[in-house]
Image (cartoon, rainbow, N blue to C red):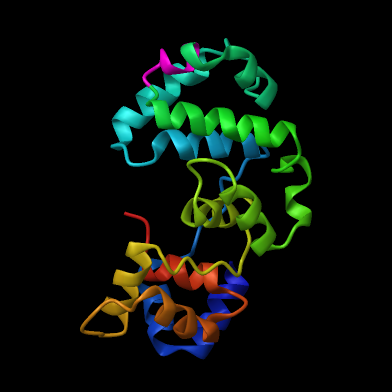
């Protein structure tokens, strides 16, 4: 990220000021090797307040009694037991679909890092409940990819408008073009447009 910060700051005075004010970027500094667990957690946390999501996720993890949560274990646990921890029907079906698609190779998590970003987004988006945004967050935070530009992210759109003094948030299509100058460090630019709270 230090290389990205230097390059972004050199290319763009607004980015330089954002970097100076916000400090070093830590995206991806807490990555794990558990891609499946990361995606399950993303599904559980979707559209829920942090405390409620954390409580449900904690009960979900407890189902596995300290063992690693694997696709096989999730499928063996079954629908009814997954629902019993407070998961909605939609999230239960999404987690089961993810487990099935990892098992059948549609989502090749063990070799995921070998694929390009677009292929990963396509594979992950084939899972019920995982869309482009979740797939891009996986690329950024779990795989540490440096050139992800999540144009549908409301925080990035709003932050970009504020940083660059625009009257309105750019539309996703406009943001695609605006982000071209940040290649191959668009992840860093996204982070500085939408710094963590």
Which residues are drawn in magenta? 81-86
Image quarter (top left, top right, bottom left or bottom right) of the C terminus: bottom left
Residue 155 falls in image quadrant: bottom left
Residue 152 falls in image quadrant: bottom left
- Farthest left residue in view: 167
Q: Residue at x 34, y 71 (%)?
A: 157
Q: In the picture provided, is 50 more to the left or to the right than 175? A: left
> Residue 15, percent across and down?
42, 81
Q: Residue at x 54, y 57 (%)?
A: 136
Frontmost residue, 33 versus 130: 130
Q: Residue at x 62, y 23 (%)?
A: 69
Frontmost residue, 106 versus 180: 106
> Residue 127, percent across and down?
57, 42
Q: Is residue 110 magenta?
A: no
Q: In the picture provided, is 1 more to the left or to the right than 42? A: right
Vertically, is 81 above or below 92? Answer: above
Q: Is residue 82 magenta?
A: yes
Vertically, is 59 above or below 143? Answer: above
Frontmost residue, 129 versus 150: 129
> Residue 49, percent across and down?
28, 37
> Residue 187, percent across and down?
53, 67
Residue 158 falls in image quadrant: bottom left
Vertically, is 178 above or below 83? Answer: below
Q: Residue at x 76, y 40 (%)?
A: 110
């Amino acid at each position: 990220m230090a290389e990205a910060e230097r390059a972004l700051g050199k290319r763009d005075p607004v980015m330089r000021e954002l970097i100076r004010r916000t400090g070093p970027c830590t995206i991806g500094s807490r990555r794990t090797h558990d891609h499946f667990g990361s995606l399950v957690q993303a599904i559980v946390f979707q559209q829920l307040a942090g405390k409620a999501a954390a409580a449900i996720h904690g009960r979900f993890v407890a189902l596995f009694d300290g063992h690693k949560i694997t696709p096989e274990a999730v499928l063996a646990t079954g629908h009814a037991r997954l629902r019993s921890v407070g998961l909605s029907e939609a999230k239960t079906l999404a987690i089961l679909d993810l487990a099935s698609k990892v098992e059948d190779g549609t989502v090749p998590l063990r070799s995921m890092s070998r694929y390009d970003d677009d292929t990963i987004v396509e594979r992950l988006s084939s899972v019920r409940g995982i869309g482009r945004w979740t797939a891009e967050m996986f690329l950024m935070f779990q795989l540490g990819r440096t050139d992800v530009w999540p144009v549908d992210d409301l925080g990035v759109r709003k932050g970009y408008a504020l940083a660059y003094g625009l009257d309105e948030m750019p539309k996703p299509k406009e943001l695609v073009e605006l982000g071209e100058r940040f290649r191959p460090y668009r992840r860093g630019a996204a982070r500085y447009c939408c710094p963590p709270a």
